[in-house]
Image (spheres, rainbow, N blue to C red):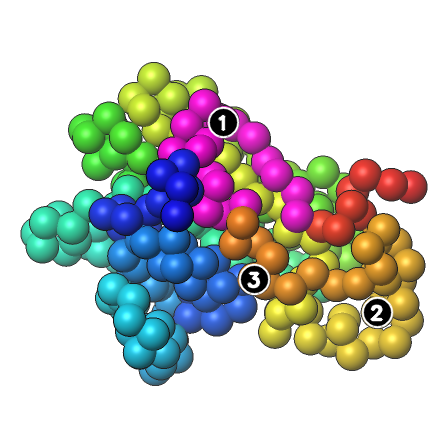
C-alpha cells in the first residue's frame, strides 16, 4: 500500500461502530492498517462486531460508552490513558434520526437529536484533541450529511445538527490546526443502512432517491471507506476544515 494511505501503527476510535456506516468505516480503516476501538451502547452487538473483525485478523477492542454521557466519555479516555493507548484517528459517527413535523416536535426530542448528533461530537472530539495536542498530531473525521447543506421536511433537528457538524469541523480546524491536527467531515448521501430501512422500503421514496441522484441508486456503506481512509491518512495532511460529500452527485444538481 502507498505510504500516503497507510495507517499501520495508528489507532482509530469510531463511535457508533457496531453496525451501519460506523462499522463499514471501521473495517475500512482496519484494512488500511489501523488498530480499532469500536464503540456503542449495546454491549452484545458491540461484542459481536468486534469478534467479527477480530476473526478477520484485525486488531480490535470494544469500548462501550454512551456518547451522550459526558462523564462516561471522559472516563473512557482516561481508561485508554491508563492502558497507554493513544487515539490517533477519531471518527465521530454516532447519530440518530427522528422524523416529525416541527409543529409536532417536543423540545425533548429536538434536544435528543442535537445532543446525539452534534454535542457528542464536540465532547468526544474535545477529549481526543486534548491528547492529540500533546502529541502534536491527530486526525478527526466528523460524519455530516447532505443535510449539512440542504434541508428536508420533517427532519429539522437532524438538519440543524448536521449543519452544526459542518461548522464544528471548521471550528476544530481553526483551533487545532496549529497543533498538527486535521479536522474534516464526510457528508454521506442516502445510504443503504438500518436507519434508512423505512425509506428504502417505501417505493415512492426509493424512486425519489434514485431519480434525484445522478448515479441513480442508493449508496453503500463501504463506499464511504475511501474518503475515510484519505482523511485519516498522510495523503490529507494539508486538508483541513473540509466536508467531502459522498452522495452519488445529489448535492450538485437541481
Q: Can you identify the residue that label 3 sits on?
A: 222
Q: Give SS at disc 1.
A: loop
- Can you give x and y, in whole percent of width and height, for residue 106 in the image? 65, 59
Among numbered discs 1 and 2, the one appearing first in the sequence:
2
Q: How many marks?
A: 3
- How much space separates mark 1 and mark 3, taking CA atoms? 22 Å
Q: Can you identify the residue that label 2 sits on?
A: 206
Q: Please tell me the numbered disc located at residue 129.
A: none
**Residue at coordinates 80% horizontally, 63% vertically from top-left?**
217
Q: Please tell me the numbered disc located at residue 239.
A: 1
Among numbered discs 2 and 3, the one appearing first in the sequence:
2
**Residue at coordinates 19% horizontally, 45% vertically from top-left?**
86
**Residue at coordinates 73% horizontally, 76% vertically from top-left?**
198
- Can you give x and y, in whole percent of width and height, for residue 231 in the image? 47, 39
**Residue at coordinates 62% horizontally, 45% vertically from top-left?**
187
Task: Describe residue 162's horizontal placement relative to residue 230 as left or right.
Answer: right
Q: Magenta segment range? A: 227-246
Task: Describe residue 112's horizontal placement relative to residue 134 as left or right.
Answer: right
Q: Give SS at disc 3.
A: helix
Question: Residue 79 in magenta?
Answer: no
- Can you give x and y, in whole percent of width and height, for residue 141 in the image? 46, 42
Q: Dot 1 surroundings within 10 Å: few (below 14), some, or many (20 or more)?
A: some
Q: Dot 2 surroundings within 10 Å: few (below 14), some, or many (20 or more)?
A: some
Vertically, is 178 above or below 240? above
Task: Describe residue 165's horizontal placement relative to residue 65 as left or right.
Answer: right
Amino acid at each position: 500500500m502507498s505510504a500516503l494511505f497507510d495507517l499501520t501503527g495508528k489507532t482509530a476510535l469510531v463511535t457508533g461502530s457496531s453496525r451501519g456506516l460506523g462499522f463499514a468505516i471501521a473495517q475500512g480503516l482496519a484494512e488500511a492498517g489501523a488498530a480499532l476501538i469500536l464503540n456503542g451502547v449495546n454491549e452484545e452487538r458491540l461484542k459481536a462486531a468486534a469478534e467479527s473483525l477480530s476473526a478477520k485478523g484485525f486488531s480490535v477492542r470494544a469500548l462501550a460508552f454512551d456518547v451522550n454521557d459526558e462523564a462516561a466519555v471522559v472516563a473512557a479516555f482516561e481508561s485508554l490513558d491508563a492502558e497507554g493507548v493513544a487515539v490517533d484517528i477519531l471518527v465521530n459517527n454516532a447519530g440518530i434520526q427522528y422524523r416529525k413535523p416541527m409543529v409536532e416536535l417536543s423540545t425533548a426530542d429536538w434536544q435528543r437529536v442535537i445532543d446525539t448528533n452534534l454535542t457528542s461530537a464536540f465532547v468526544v472530539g474535545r477529549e481526543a484533541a486534548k491528547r492529540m495536542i500533546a502529541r502534536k498530531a491527530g486526525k478527526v473525521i466528523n460524519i455530516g450529511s447532505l443535510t449539512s447543506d440542504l434541508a428536508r421536511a420533517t427532519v429539522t433537528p437532524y438538519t440543524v445538527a448536521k449543519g452544526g457538524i459542518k461548522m464544528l469541523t471548521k471550528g476544530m480546524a481553526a483551533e487545532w490546526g496549529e497543533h498538527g491536527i486535521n479536522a474534516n467531515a464526510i457528508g454521506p448521501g442516502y445510504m443503504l443502512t438500518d436507519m434508512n430501512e423505512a425509506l428504502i422500503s417505501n417505493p415512492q421514496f426509493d424512486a425519489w432517491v434514485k431519480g434525484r441522484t445522478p448515479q441513480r441508486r442508493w449508496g453503500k456503506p463501504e463506499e464511504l471507506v475511501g474518503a475515510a481512509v484519505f482523511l485519516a491518512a498522510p495523503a490529507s495532511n494539508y486538508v483541513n476544515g473540509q466536508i467531502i460529500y459522498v452522495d452519488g452527485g445529489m448535492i450538485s444538481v437541481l
